[in-house]
Amino acid sequence: MSEITASVVKELREKTQAGMMDCKKALQETAGDFEAAIKWLREKGLSAAAKRSERSASEGIIDVKFNDDRTTAVVFELNSETDFVARNEKFRSLLNQLLDQVLAKQPKDIIELEAQPFISDESKKVADAITDAIAVIGENIIARRFALFNAASGNILESYVHNGRIGVLVELSAKGTSELAKNIAMHIAAANPAPQYLDRSAVSAEHLNSEKEIYKNQILQDEKNKNKPANIIDKIVEGKINKFYQDICLLEQAYIRDPDKTIKDVLPEGVSVVRFARFELGA
């Protein structure tokens, strides 16, 4: 059993912000094992970090990072409780480390990411590193989501981040240019409504059927439509669905830099948008 000195108890308290007596008991229960004591406090809900992890976190930062040859990129949303903490240097450092982690280790989702050894200190997991940051910074921190793009050979990756609150990644096919990709990324960030799908074929049947049902019910609630034939109602619904596609499908949206053209219209022959990701803070 390691010696439980006042300095060790003090260090544990600083690390976890739990009470002094709770820290002493944790060390006694774990035979003086410092890391086990941290875990014990967390499991008992006595660590301040553990308590903070239950609090809502809808502020934070979205950022993007590329590998050296710009063939891989990640957009990541890291949440905090307040905008003030989102500007904290330690919070930003954690986000940068998480961006590096995803680029290097390429997890498929947040669950896999948090279970990986932390790239900056492989003696701990990513989840533990986040918990440590919660204890130090004093607010709940949540690694909410990320999108990782590995571009096909010759394809173009570009990004746009607006004030840390909206982040976009775009992949264009090989004949595209970085300038065009950047302009499309800026469009995706600014578009209202924001695009949800690339084109009509990407819209799920469930989403489409739900919209049709909503539109039909809206139409039939209007007294002047109640006696119209079913085929007329269907045509009205069809018109609304076309507008729905124009709102949520990127290729059908009016291009913000030239509203007389759609995104599809501004793509040169032989160039296509392969995919995109758009994150808006807290959305």
Image (cartoon, rainbow, N blue to C red):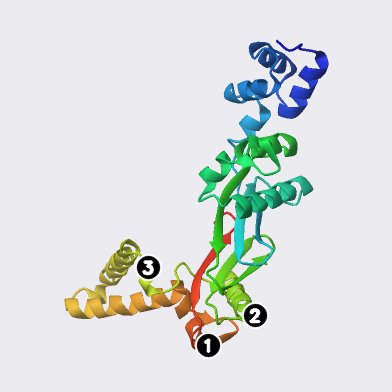
Q: Earlier in the sequence, mark 3 or mark 2?
A: 2
Pointer 1 with pointer 2, Cβ within 8 A: no
Separation of marks 1 and 2 at Cα, in angstroms: 13 Å
Separation of marks 1 and 3 at Cα, in angstroms: 24 Å
**Which quadrant of the figure contains the N terminus?**
top right
**Secondary structure state at the residue bearing disc 1:** loop
10 Å neighbourhood of mark 2: few (<14), some, or many (≥20)? Answer: few
Q: Give the vertical position of 82 relative to 11 (above or below).
A: below
**Secondary structure state at the residue bearing disc 3:** loop
Whole-percent x and y of residue 18?
Answer: 70, 23
Q: Earlier in the sequence, mark 1 or mark 3?
A: 3
State the count of labels: 3
User: Which corner quadrant of the image does residue 168 belong to?
Assistant: bottom right
Whole-percent x and y of residue 259?
Answer: 54, 86
| Residue tagged 1 | 268
Residue 83 shows up from this direction: no
* Three-letter residue code for mark 1: Pro
| Residue tagged 3 | 203
Which residue corresponds to the image point at 74% horizontal and 49% vertical from the top-left?
93
User: Which corner quadrant of the image does residue 28 belong to?
Assistant: top right
* Three-letter residue code for mark 2: Glu
Choose mark 1 or mark 3, whichever is in front: 1
- Taking the view exactly as shown, the residue that stands out farthest to the right is 7
Residue 179 marker: 2
User: Which corner quadrant of the image does residue 178 belong to?
Assistant: bottom right
10 Å neighbourhood of mark 3: few (<14), some, or many (≥20)? Answer: some
**Which quadrant of the figure contains the C terminus?**
bottom right
